[in-house]
Image (cartoon, rainbow, N blue to C red):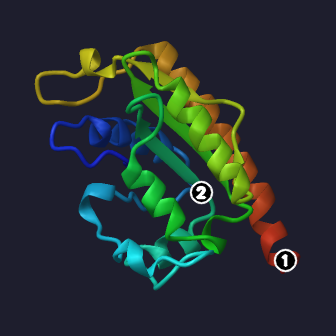
Amino acid sequence: MSASVRSQRISPAIADWVTALLSRTETVTIDPIDLAAISLPDDEHLLPGGGPRSEVVDRIESADAFVFVTPEYNRSYPASLKRLIDWHYREWMFKPATIVAYGAQGGHAAAEHLRGVLAELHVVTTGNATNLRSPWSALDDSGRFIPSQSLDAALSAALDELVWWADALTPARTARPFTG
């Protein structure tokens, strides 16, 4: 999930890197969501626990896990991501997520704020996380993100943990759906 909607953004380049690493896992189907490419209903229709169905509700609902690629803006994650999260409720529940945060200082504050919101929705966030400090300095001439080997290894560890959690939680959600 690419969270930045700004015109001058590198979120898609980082999301492409994540997708490339995830695509090495044969059991994973990837459905990238770019928040700049979707529209949500007006907030006046938002109700506790969600609201009218959004154009991505079925995609979120059918996912077994999530990767949030988010910048840090003013020591938090962007409002576009908060809106997406708030427009859905049960669709997130009891699924795992990995956070790939980036910014001038590595996106740590954005990741921690996002973890708290996701915990409220019963999302299990991976202990392994990937924080990118000034990733724009690792873009090649075509705008592609070229990570170091250590960043590749860190993201691979986080994605391996994400797949493990998805494999554990998916059958649990099916066998014992949460009804509370």
What is the spatial separation of the Cα atoms under label 1 and label 2, in whole angstroms?
A: 31 Å
**Residue 178 appears anywhere in the view:** yes
Residue at point 55% right, 76% down?
50
Residue at point 63% right, 63% down?
64
Mark 1 residue type: Gly
x and y percentages locating residue 43 in the rendered image: 39, 72
Residue 150's disc number: none
x and y percentages locating residue 32 in the rendered image: 39, 57
**Residue 1 appears anywhere in the view:** no
The residue most toward the front is: 44
Q: Earlier in the sequence, mark 1 or mark 2?
A: 2
> In which quadrant of the rendered image does the C terminus lie?
bottom right
x and y percentages locating residue 173 in the rendered image: 79, 71
Q: Is residue 41 above or below residue 155?
A: below
Residue at image mark 2: 27
- Relative to 59, 14 lies left or right: left
Residue at image mark 1: 180
Mark 2 residue type: Thr
- Relative to 81, 114 lies left or right: right
